[in-house]
Structures are given as C-alpha cells and as structure tokens.
C-alpha cells in the first residue's frame, strides 16, 4: 500500500523553472508548500543511471537527504521510435552546450537524425515521465506516465519548454507548445504520472 503524504512542505528536486511551474500547478489543489531545490541551494546530483526511474530516484533521494524533507523528482524525456527510443533518458544531454541547454539545437539534431536514417513520416514518439516521491527515511513511491504522439517539422508554438514545439499529441492537431498550459497539464505525460501520484498519496 502506498504511503500517504501528510507533510506541510515538499521539495521539488529540479532546477528547471518550466518543470517547477507545471508541478506547482498540478499540486495547486493540495495544502502543501512547494519548495524548489534551486531555491534551497541544493546541488544537482550526477544522473548516472540509464533509466528514467533510476535518475529520478537519484534526484529525489539526494534532495530528501539534503533538506530533511520529502522530495519529488521527475525524470522525463522523448522517445522517438525511428531512433530506437533516442534521445530518451539523454533528452536533456542532447540540448547541452557550453552556454547551457539549447532545445532548439536538440530538436534540430533530432530532425537531422531522422533524415539521416531515412525514416518515413509519421515520426511516432512518446513523452515519458517517471515520478519518484522520496522521504528522508529512504522510502519512495514511483509513478509512470506517458503521452503518445509524433515529431513534427517545422516546430510549432511558443509555449511549454524542451521538445514541446516538436511534439504533436496523438488525437490532437496541436503540439504541446501550441496548447494552453492548463490543457497541456490535463493531457501530458507528467499529468498522467501525477494523476497516479495524487490518487496513491494525496487523495
């Protein structure tokens, strides 16, 4: 049986402000103060695992141990079928530059790889999200979410973050970057994972 969340404060183990805003919105209905790892000055641990859940566990447990508070971490990315699931767990790495992350560069690289492979459209893909809620005593709960769709080019929309302009949700004519933030928060991979988290630990 899942552990209930009963504490007044929760650390979100991310330095990504776009992700933090989404998580705050998804938990807005619950009486919990959301603190960010960045605001607390917590270091970002090395993500040395090769799976989403492995890296989410690293981040959640590091933040819980450092802060003495429960911590929530997500590890997420886009899996492109024609690229054998790449970039996947390395989604953020594809955006790394000497001057920080550049997701326009990452999306251009993804398209170039698709062209190189000769993959025919539609370029089916999915966003994955693994959430880990960890307590300072070492206990954790794990929740998985996904959103199926396809990669599009040229990219569309100015909202969201990361690969959102390149990802068109299945059954929709919109990319995540073209959606109203509230709509995206109802249908995204993170929303699906959060629905499971809330049902298990908050509801």
Image: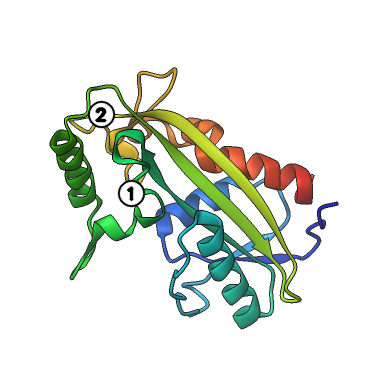
Q: Which residue is mark 2?
A: 152
Secondary structure at badge 2 equals: loop
Quadrant hosting residue 10: bottom right
Q: Are marks 1 and 2 in contact (CB under 8 Å)?
A: no
Q: Which residue is mark 1?
A: 87
- Horizontal placement of 195 versus 163: left or right? right
- Horizontal placement of 4 versus 115: left or right? right
Of 164 and 18, nearer the camera is 164
Do we see residue 27 in this rendering? no
Give x and y (percent) for residue 126.
Answer: 43, 35
Give x and y (percent) for residue 149.
Answer: 40, 27
Quadrant hosting residue 157: top left
Give x and y (percent) for residue 117.
Answer: 18, 36
Q: Residue at x 24, y 31 (%)?
A: 156
Give x and y (percent) for residue 73.
Answer: 56, 61
Q: Residue at x 58, y 74 (%)?
A: 63
- Horizontal placement of 144 versus 8: left or right? left
Of 120 and 169, nearer the camera is 120
- Relative vertical location of residue 143 with respect to residue 156 in this rendering, above or below: below
- Horizontal placement of 22 versus 57: left or right? left
Does label 1 or label 2 sit earlier along the sequence? Answer: 1
Q: CA distance from mark 1 to mark 2?
A: 16 Å
Q: Residue at x 66, y 60 (%)?
A: 133
Q: Residue at x 44, y 69 (%)?
A: 47
């Amino acid at each position: 049986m899942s552990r209930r969340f009963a504490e007044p404060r929760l650390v979100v183990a991310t330095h990504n402000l776009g992700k933090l805003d989404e998580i705050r919105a998804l938990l807005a209905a619950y009486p919990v103060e959301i603190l960010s790892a960045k605001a607390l000055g917590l270091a970002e641990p090395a993500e040395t695992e090769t799976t989403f859940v492995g890296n989410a566990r690293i981040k959640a447990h590091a933040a819980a141990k450092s802060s003495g508070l429960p911590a929530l971490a997500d590890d997420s990315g886009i899996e492109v079928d024609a690229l054998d699931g790449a970039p996947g767990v390395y989604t953020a790495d594809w955006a790394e530059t000497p001057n920080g992350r550049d997701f326009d560069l990452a999306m251009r690289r993804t398209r170039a790889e698709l062209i190189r492979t000769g993959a025919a459209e539609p370029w089916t893909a999915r966003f994955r999200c693994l959430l880990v809620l960890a307590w300072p005593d070492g206990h954790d709960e794990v929740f998985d979410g996904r959103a199926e769709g396809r990669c599009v080019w040229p990219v569309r929309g100015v909202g969201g973050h990361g690969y959102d302009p390149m990802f068109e949700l299945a059954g929709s004519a919109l990319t995540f970057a073209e959606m109203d933030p509230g709509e995206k928060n109802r249908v995204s991979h993170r929303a699906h994972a959060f629905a499971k988290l809330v049902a298990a630990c908050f509801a």
